[in-house]
Image: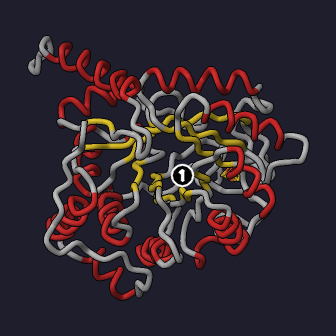
Amino acid sequence: MTATVHVLPNTPATRHDWRLAEVLALFAQPFNDLLFQAQSVHRAYFDANRVQVSTLLSIKTGACPEDCKYCPQSGHYNTGLEREKLMQVQQVIEAAKRAKDIGSTRFCMGAAWKHPSGKDFPYVLEMVKGVKALGMETCMTLGKLSRSQSEALATAGLDYYNHNLDTSPEFYGNIITTRTYSERLQTLAYVRDAGMKICCGGILGMGESTDDRAKLLMQLANLPQHPESVPINMLVKVQGTPLENAEEVDPFDFIRMLAVARIMLPKSHVRLSAGREQMNEQMQALAFFAGANSIFYGEKLLTTDNPQAEKDLALFARLGIKPEEREEHADEVHQGAIEQALLAQQNERLFYNAAA
Ligand code: SF4
């Protein structure tokens, strides 16, 4: 099955020279103008009715030595989170098989580490090889990497490495003190040099200003090559973390962030990421219209709840959205599993009673 992409006569160029005033002007547009612009850019590069689906598994949970103020996995805060050691390679591969069976095309593995240790790293490489052998795209988030670790992961078959910048360089010190912004940029450079794709984004709702949001997007868009995947997270306020009482983000401001990300990073997948559970279906639909075209699906989003796969498929069916095929080596059997799941949902809809 081939996707229809509506290419505009003037396909917007991919830029790497954004200035703050221009980005703030995008944010300041009337909401409908911004959404129209974002949707136009979106249609120039993507099928507007396809959304990429990934599944995320926490392969090592809690007791992280970093002090990210939003994170229940940090060992600095008492959130009651159950700590788990690094999972066994076979368990991870079994989880990836289940994710593939429910139609996920990418399997993301996350470990709460400052950086992978020499003791754990060989197991991590085995996980990459095992998941890759299932025909899925692989993604990992393991903290800071050295050049040689980046190269070893790429050789093992890792497609994407996730390492978020979280916020602007100026606001960053209010949120994390144990790892610098430049260390993050260095890891991203190693990942890129090793030939892997980058997944990098940020979080809204930590007390940052619109300027900080704009500056985060400038960091991402002004990199020599745009990250292929840009997760935009809404803070999930977890009791016991320093941000447990942070002020709510205006939902329209969150949609604005997605729309500006879509305009500045026209070829990247913009992921509606953590915090989706708190969003109603109307807000998710608006997020897709603003240019979000990737979600986490099924399993659990690291340690915070993620809407269940059935709910996601039901929303997709109501909106006429289909899961995106893998970029390379489209696997018909795999795609068939997704289509079957959607069909089952659509059949169920025949019995849906809107008045109930
Ligand atoms: S966000 Fe990552 S690095 Fe920061 S505390 Fe949580 S697990 Fe550790």
Q: Going by the image, does 158 lie left or right of 123?
A: left
Instruction: Look at the image and name its color scheme.
Output: secondary structure
Q: Is residue 298 or residue 16 the one in the foreground?
A: 16
Q: How many marks?
A: 1
Residue drawn at point x = 51 percent, y = 60 percent: 201
Q: Going by the image, does 346 lie left or right of 213?
A: left
Q: Is residue 281 above or below residue 208?
A: above
Q: Is residue 97 or residue 206 the one in the foreground?
A: 97
| Image quadrant where residue 107 sits | top right
Q: Is residue 165 or residue 66 the one in the foreground?
A: 165
Q: Going by the image, does 306 lie left or right of 244?
A: left
Residue drawn at point x = 53 percent, y = 20 percent: 98
Residue type at tag 1: Asn
| Image quadrant where residue 181 sits | bottom right
Q: Is residue 297 above or below residue 194?
A: above
> How far across and how far down the image is residue 310, in percent?
35, 22
Residue at far left of view: 355
> How far across and how far down the image is residue 62, in percent?
74, 39
Q: Going by the image, does 245 lie left or right of 184?
A: left
Residue drawn at point x = 31 percent, y = 77 percent: 13
Q: Secondary structure at mark 1?
A: loop
Q: Is residue 277 above or below residue 210?
A: above
Q: Is residue 212 or residue 206 the one in the foreground?
A: 212
| Image quadrant where residue 324 sits | top left
Query: How would you rate the neighbour count of disc 1 (Cα within 10 Å): few for under 14, some for 14-19, many for 20 or more?
Result: few
Residue at far right of view: 119
Q: Which residue is mark 1?
A: 245
Q: Which image quarter is the N terminus in?
A: top left
| Disc 1 within 8 angstroms of ligand 1 (CB) | no
> How far across and how far down the image is residue 45, in percent?
27, 60
> How far across and how far down the image is residue 97, in percent?
55, 22
